[in-house]
Image (cartoon, rainbow, N blue to C red):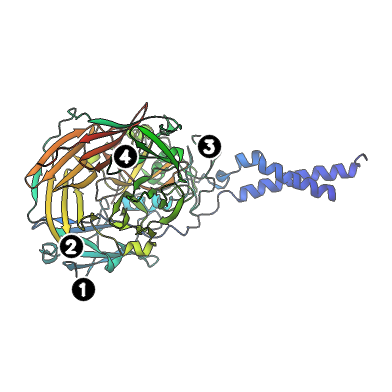
Amino acid sequence: MKAFLMAFGVGLVLAAASGAQAYHRFWAGCNYDAPTFMTTMTRDAGQDYSNAARYEGYQWGGGCWNYDDVDSYPYDAPGDASTHGEGGDCSGLTFKTWRESTDQWRDGRYYWRALRNVHGPYTAGGFKSGQGAPNHTVNKSTAGVMDAFASDTHIGMVFFRTLYGGDQIVEAKCEACGTNIFYRTYRSDPNYGGVGRWGWTG
Amino acid sequence: MRRPSFRSLVGGAAGIAAGVIAGIGLTSLSAASPPALGFHIGLEAGHVPPVLTLPGEPVRLRYAIVCRPRDDGEPCDGSGEVYVREGQGGSFQQLALTRDADSYAGRYFVDLPPSIAGSERGFSYYAVLRDDSTGATVTVPSGGAAAPQRSLPLRQMMGIDLGVHSFGQTQKPDARAVDAQWGSDVGQAGLAGSRELGFVGPSAFDVDAGGRVTLLDQVNRRVERWTRGRAEATPVAVSGGLADFVAEPDGTLDVLEPPDRLTSAPVLRSFRPDGSARWTQQLADRTWAKLDVGPEGPVVQQQPSEQWRPVAEHGLALGRAAQAVRGRTGRPLANGRDVVVERRGRAEIRIAEVAGNAVVRSWRIVGTTPLGEVQLVEPLGSRIVLVAKAYTEDRSEDVVVVLDRTGIAQSFSVDPHEWAEAAALARFRLAGSSLYQLGSAPSGAFVDRFDLEVER
């Protein structure tokens, strides 16, 4: 019994320090349920959805989070999708907020819940060029709530405009930044273009 | 050493197997948990106040009400009231918000009666917004009746039309005050990020009355001060995020940090001149735009209140409630007045210098080319210096306009030099009669100086 207990302890340590940690991290509790097809999609529902992803962290290539207000894996290596941590990346957050399909030719509205692990087919650069049936470019000066500004490396959505002319942007910016609302000046930045989602219903 | 028995070998192997299985199970359990909504996901708001109005201009107040996401994917079931009054004192009148069909600029709105919107004394107001599914409410601005939004009429403003902006005719600086290569040695500036993720350089800077430049080198967790071309570094315990920065006249160093992966709210960190920490104070609002120094200490322009709020007075930090009830529309100036700024529409900026509840002087600047963020509005003697961005879809330049009673006293354009990211509204400072600009390039960071014309 003594040998069993000692070995049991060794086994626990091994499990924590090995592949169990790498492959059974946050994504282990995410799901792959089908999205809910919807006939409506309002900008303020998009605000509700993206606002709730605040504090849930950032994961390169990710798109799964819960609503416990904590980034469960805040120190993942930047730019490494295999770390399977919590949170979306910039394009994953936008894809889910904009209720897009994983098929680029579909322009319908697909509601992905927070724990549904999906990133979508678009990079920031793809969004910037208006790639995919649901997306299009917009004039930067007219971009409003839940339109977005995208560069070749990043995309953030307009949460609300401001008095001094910048924008409150909801975005998953980097591992250290997490997901939150920040004051940005992407609107006037030549590296960024205006991007919109077809099909808002209000 | 005694040879292990067969029984102990089997027991040990079984123990390791059981331990690994239990470890995997525990790790999986600690992964994603059911989506229990967290503490912070409460009611949020968005609102841009019309702080400077023209005679006869109708006023529609618009709000976004942002709730916890509904499981059916539909928007928040919200409602609210605006408490508004003519002028800046007296009792408030309650007006219900109407729910619009569209939420492009905020779904909930109220049109102010002409008697209030057109009042010669302006008007003041606050809103109580509600999530009808939970009964939760939020007041905007959070100071409520004690520190409401204030709107003032522009009756005798100077009108200025910038017309179509001519790109490519920028002015060269008079001097390069700081030239720092990327690196971590003293005199260099830290660079973070990558080509794939974008680069971040020094996020803010300040200049004292003697023209000494202090750079917030947050990547290297320090500030660097240049005196006659020689740099001196002072370590400061900052997070490394894109922060704003001011150096107060007594040498206090204030660093305004954004939320990050571990800290859910923005904080102002105050350091002594030697870099030792004095205090850290959370802001009243969730988002900040700009840090400055008022007559009594650091002040921050914040959202959703869209107010300037003090974070400390005479060196002592103020709690969040104390900040909220001291919120004001304009940035407090050393002369006791406020400067009020509103960028509205596609290409319009309104500016007023305010004494108490009276507009002393004001300008309305319009253009044909879109005008972006207002980087700086600062008095220079009897003049006002404005720096704002003119932009198209693929170009931008900073426009410097020196305003006086006759209109434009001086105007020129500046290349933005934004190769690496910095804090959004921290790229310009005015010291004496010189304008300083923080810039960056693939080789390093720099601060350029533009000498403005002085009154004779």
Q: Which label belongs to residue B91?
A: 1
Question: Which chain is home to disc 2?
Answer: B
Work out whether mark 1 precedes mark 4 in sequence or the reverse, and give the earlier one: 1
Q: Nearer the viewer, mark 3 or mark 4?
A: 4
Q: Nearer the viewer, mark 2 or mark 1?
A: 2
Secondary element at tag 2: loop
Q: Which residue: 66% across, 41% down? A: A17
How far apart marks 2 and 3 lie (CA) works out to: 53 Å
Q: Please give the residue where the numbered disc 4 appears in the rendered image.
A: B212
B113 to B448, vertically: above or below: below
Question: Which chain is home to disc 1?
Answer: B
Check disc 1 and give the amino acid type. Answer: Ser
Check disc 2 and give the amino acid type. Answer: Gly
B40 to B211, vertically: above or below: below
Front residue of B253/B241: it is B253
How far apart marks 1 and 3 lie (CA) works out to: 56 Å
Q: Nearer the viewer, mark 2 or mark 3?
A: 2
Check disc 4 and give the amino acid type. Answer: Arg
Secondary element at tag 1: loop
Secondary element at tag 3: loop
Work out whether mark 4 precedes mark 2 in sequence or the reverse, and give the earlier one: 4
Q: Is residue B88 left or right of residue B145?
A: left
Q: Please give the residue where the numbered disc 2 appears in the rendered image.
A: B356
How far apart marks 1 and 4 lie (CA) works out to: 49 Å
Q: Are marks 3 and 4 on the same chain?
A: no
Q: Which label belongs to residue A77?
A: 3
Question: Which chain is home to disc 4?
Answer: B
Q: Residues within 10 Å of mark 4 (few under 14, many from 20)?
A: some
Q: Nearer the viewer, mark 1 or mark 4?
A: 4
B223 to B105, vertically: above or below: above
Check disc 3 and give the amino acid type. Answer: Ala
Residue A15 percent across, percent down from the top left:
69, 43
